[in-house]
Amino acid sequence: MITTVVLLLLLSLVIAAIGVWFSRRSRLQDDRQKSEHQASSAPPELTFETIDPGDAVVFWDETSVLAETVLECQENLTNRTTHWRWILLSDGKLVESGPMGRTLYSSATVFYQGTAPFAELTADADRGGVLKTFEERVREGNVSHQPVTFIYDGNRHRMKSTGTFAATVKGNSLPPGPWSDITANEQDNVYFKMAGGDGEEALGIWTTHIAFLVGRRLTDADLKGLYGQ
C-alpha cells in the first residue's frame, strides 16, 4: 500500500514537472516570437542612401538641419552605370553619398557665364580651358604626370574626374541657377571633381552656369544621427 502511494506521489511530481517545463517552454517561444515581431516591424536604420526630404541630419556639434531636396543621380558609361545622391540641406550645404563615400560640401559659389572663372573652366583646350584640357590629357594618357589645376580664392584644386549625369529630383524645387537648369537630357548636365590641399574636395555642376562647391569627407564621427520626420 505504501509503495503504491509513493509511486503515485512520484508520478504526480513527474507530471507536475513536465507541466512546468512545457509552460516555461511556451513562454520562451512567445517571448522569442514577440521579440522577432518587434524587430521585423521596427523601421530600418536611416542612412544617407535612404534619407528623404523632410528627414533631419544632426551633427556632433549639435547643428540640426533638414534634407530639403534629394537628387538621385546616375552616370551611364559604355560598360557600367554609377549611382549616387546629392542631398541639399536646409542650411545651404550639400551631402554627396555614393560608391566613393560621403562628402559634406559646406561652401558654394556660382560662376555665371561671362565671368573669368566660368571662362577659365569651360574654354577650349587650346585656350587653356581646365575641363577640356583635362579631358584631352586623359585621352592621351598623360594626365598623371601633367595634372590640370584650377586656382580659385587663393586655393589650388587638381582635376580628378568629369562626366555627365541624369538626375531624378525628390522634394522641394531646386535652387535657381545651375541646379534648376538640370535637364532630363544627361548630356546637358556636366559634373567635375577636384582635390585641394589638406584633404579638401571640390565639386562642380555645369548646366547653364556653374555651381562650385568645396568641402571635406564626412565620417561617422561627424554625425550624431539621422532622424525620420
Image (cartoon, rainbow, N blue to C red):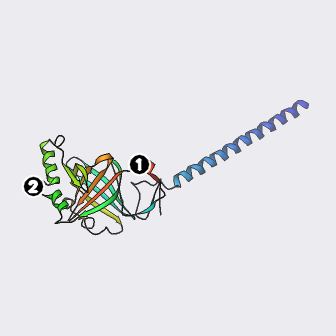
Residue 25 at what x, y percent from top left?
67, 43
Apparent side of residue 110 relative to residue 123 in the rendered image (left or right): right
Tell me the SS state at disc 2.
Answer: helix
Q: Position of residue 107 (x, y in %)?
A: 33, 59
The circle drawn on residue 172 is none
Q: Please tell me whether mark 1 or mark 2 is closer to you in this view.
A: 2
204 or 71, which lies in front? 204
Quadrant of the image occupied by residue 205: bottom left
Q: Which residue is mark 1?
A: 219
Q: Going 27% across and 65% down the picture, which residue do you hit?
A: 179
Instruction: Residue 157 in the image: state x and y as whole percent.
Output: 24, 50
Residue type, mark 1 in image: Thr
Marker count (numbered):
2
Q: In the rendered image, which quarter is residue 115 located in?
A: bottom left
Relative horizontal placement of residue 145, taking residue 40 as reference (left or right): left
Compared to residue 15, the image places residue 179 above or below, namely: below
Nearest the eye: 41 or 125 = 125
Name the residue at 73% across, 39% down: 18
Query: According to the image, label 2 marks what residue?
Result: 127
Q: Are marks 1 and 2 in contact (CB under 8 Å)?
A: no
The residue under label 2 is which amino acid type? Arg
